[in-house]
Image (cartoon, helix red, strand yellow):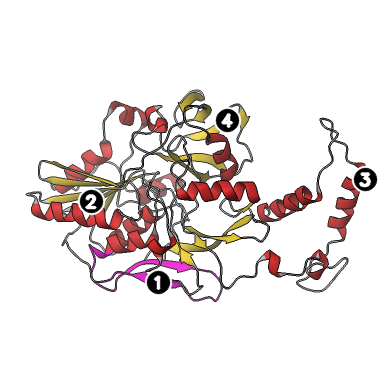
Amino acid sequence: MTELKQEETSTISNKRGNILLGSGLAVTLSAAAFFSGMHIGSSAKVEAGDMPASLFSVFQVGSDEVGVADMTEFWQVWDLLDKKFVDATTTESFSTEAKVRGAISGMVNSFDDPYTVYMPPEDAEQFAETISGNFSGVGMEVGMRDSLITVISPLPDTPAAKSGILSGDVIVEIDGVSTKGMSIDEAVKLIRGEKGTEVVMQMYRKGASEFLEIPVTRDTISVPTIATRTEGDVFIVQLYNFNAISEMKMQEALQDYINSDAKSLVLDMRGNPGGFLQSAVAIASYFLPTGKIVVRESFGGDEEEQVYRTYGKKVVDVSPDNFVILVNGGSASAAEILAGALKEHEIATVIGEQTFGKGSVQELIPLKRKGSLKVTIARWLTPDGVSISDNGLAPNINIPMSAEDFLAGNDTQYNAAVEWLDGKRDFAVATLAEELENTAN
C-alpha cells in the first residue's frame, strides 16, 4: 500500500488548519479498524502538555460551578484503590501512570463512539506503523456495527479472502478471546501479528446454523488500487480503495473506456473501504461539471459546514441508463461519498446492497507524553444532506447476494447491472425503500 504522506493531501485545505487524510481509509493491511476521515495534528487545539501539570487546574473537588467537574468521588476511589486493592495474580503494584492512562481511557470510552479512542504510547506507535504500511496482517477491513466487530470486506487475494471470510461476518472470538465489549482497536491488536503466524477467528454468519471457526495465516498484504476488464460492450472498473494514486489510475481507466468500443460503464466499489477524501472529490470531478457538491462535512451545532465541490476535470458523459455503480455492505466512507454524489446528481444507477455507513471524521491529536487521541469531530453528508452514518447509502435497486452465491461465483449484482444496461427495468427485487415499507406494514 502506498505510504500515506501529508504532502499528498495538502492540496485540500481545511479551515481548522489540519491536514485531512481521508474520508474512510481503513487500516487495510492489519485487519483493520477505520482511522480515516482523520485530521492529523491540530493547530487550533490545546494539547495536554500545554496545561498546568496539576489536575486541580482543570477539576475542583466539590465544586458546584457550571462547567467545572466535581472530582470528589474520583479522588475518593483513587485513594480507596491505593489502600485496599490486592491483585490475586501478582504482588506488583499498579503505577500512577497506568492509573492515569486507565482514567483517560475510561473518560474517552464514556463517549460511546467506536472511532474515538485514546492510545497510550505503545498503541500510538503501533498505529503510526499501521498508517505507514510497515506491518503484516490478514487483509480485511473491520468496523463496528450494532456494537459488534463486523467484517467490512476482505481484500482480494489476501489471507482473509482466501480463507473464506465474507463481508458482514461478525467476529465472535479471536484466538479464544471473546469480542464482547471489545473496541475495534483492541480487536485489531489481536488480529495483527507477524507474517507466517496464525490467528483463529470464530465468526457468526447470517443464515449459518452454527459459528464458523476460521484459521488465517498472516502475511504481507499488497493492496490493489484498480482493475479493468471488458465483457461484451460493458467496460468494468473495479476500484478497490481511494489511495494517493487512485485519481491517476481512474483517469487512465476512463481514457481506456473512451478509447474502447464499450457502450456502457460499470464502476464496482463493492468491498471498497474508502480512503483519501481528495481522491473521492477528484474522481467525482471526472463525471460531473465544475462546482457540483460531492460531500458536506458537518461539525454540528452552529458551526458552518465545509463543502467539497468538483473542479473542472470532467472527462466522460454518462447517464443512469449507461452507467452503473455496484455497492454492498463492504462499501464504506469515500466509496459511499462517491456513490452518493453520483447517485444524487442523477448520472448513475446504484445497484447492490445497503452500504456500511462509515460517515464520521476523526482527528488524530498527538499528546505530550507520546500518546494520541483519535477523536470524531464531524460527519459526512451527501450533497442532499443525507448522513452517511445513518444506516449507510441505499442503492437505487437493491439486489442481495448470498454467501452461497458468492462462494459459487454467481454474481447476482453484476448480472443485474448487465440486465439494467441492456434495458431491463422491471426487476423482481424491490427497492430498499419498498422493502422497509413492507417490513413496517
At horizontal 82% and vertical 74% (from top left) the residue drawn is 65
Q: Position of residue 39 (x, y in %)?
A: 50, 63
Q: Amino acid at mark 1?
A: Val
Indicate which disc, 1 or 3, sits on the residue closer to the N terminus: 3
Q: In 3D space, how far apart are the residues under numbered discs 1 and 3 (Cα atoms)? A: 54 Å
The secondary element bearing badge 4 is classed as strand
Left or right, 394 with respect to 285, comes to right
Left or right, 330 with respect to 75, comes to left
Residue 308 against residue 210 in the figure, above or below: below
In magenta stretch: residue 305: yes
At horizontal 52% and vertical 25% (from top left) the residue drawn is 211
At horizontal 80% and vertical 70% (from top left) the residue drawn is 57
Indicate which disc, 2 or 4, sits on the residue closer to the N terminus: 4
List the residue tagged with mark 2: 324
Q: Amino acid at mark 3?
A: Lys
Residues rendered magenta in the picture: 285-311
Q: Amino acid at mark 2?
A: Val
List the residue tagged with mark 1: 307
Residue 408 against residue 21 in the figure, above or below: above
Q: Position of residue 22 (x, y in %)?
A: 43, 58
Circle nearer the viewer, 3 or 2? 3
Indicate which disc, 2 or 1, sits on the residue closer to the N terminus: 1
Q: Position of residue 343 (x, y in %)?
A: 29, 59
Give me the disc on residue 173.
4
The secondary element bearing badge 3 is classed as helix
Residue 35 against residue 305 in the figure, above or below: above
Q: In 3D space, how far apart are the residues under numbered discs 2 and 4 (Cα atoms)? A: 38 Å
The secondary element bearing badge 1 is classed as strand
Circle nearer the viewer, 1 or 3? 3
